[in-house]
Image (cartoon, rainbow, N blue to C red):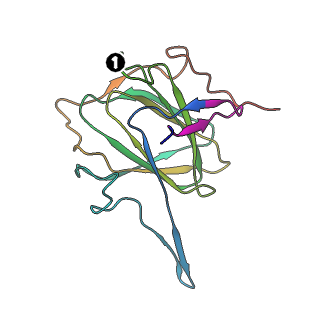
Amino acid sequence: MSKPTEYSATGARQPRIHGVKTKALRVIPDERGWLMEILRADDAELFTKFGQTYVSATYPGVVKAWHYHQRQIDHFACVSGMVKLVLLDTRPDSPTNGAVNEFFIGTQNPMLVQVPNLVYHGWKCISPEMALVVNVPTEPYSYTEPDEYRLEPHDTLPYDWTRKDG
């Protein structure tokens, strides 16, 4: 079985970061509106443990990055608007060390992205309206000892958040 390949915003092929999994999300519409399941306890390929669920609002053009977790695994789905979710693998022993993955997720591409622990991640709202990102991490947030290790979004990791026109 070949390794999954992702494509960057410029169309360049990039290897899927080791441990990253995705799931296409199905929107079930009816005359009242719609329903979209994000993560289920019987998703054998993705579900490991429940920590909490939260939603993060991001204004157009804003970047929320970079951070990683020592223990926590994240499960991101953008349920309103669109974001460019970017993952960067800096794990020294990873077979995909140095790889960058970009996922364009939201109303135009409903998808769940599982981010392994120790992988830097962040996103940029790329829609003209605010984006709402739901996360179902495997661990509850600890206010006294947060499992978050942060860097500034610009000029700290080898990634340029500016839009690529052309």
Range drawn in magenta? 3-13
Seen at 59% across and 58% down, the residue is 107
Q: Quadrant of residue 91?
A: top left
Query: Viewed as shown, does residue 154 lie left or right of 149?
Result: right
Seen at 57% across and 85% down, the residue is 31
Identify the residue at the far front of this view: 1
Give the residue number, with chain letter if any, for mark 1: 93
Query: Viewed as shown, does residue 25 lie left or right of 50?
Result: right
Identify the residue at the far right of this view: 166
Disc 1 residue type (three-letter): Asp
- Between 103 and 81, which is closer to the camera in this rendering? 103
Q: Position of residue 147 (x, y in %)?
A: 25, 30
Q: Position of residue 83 (x, y in %)?
A: 57, 44
Q: Position of residue 70 (x, y in %)?
A: 26, 28
Q: Quadrant of residue 158?
A: top right
Image: 96 above or below 64: above
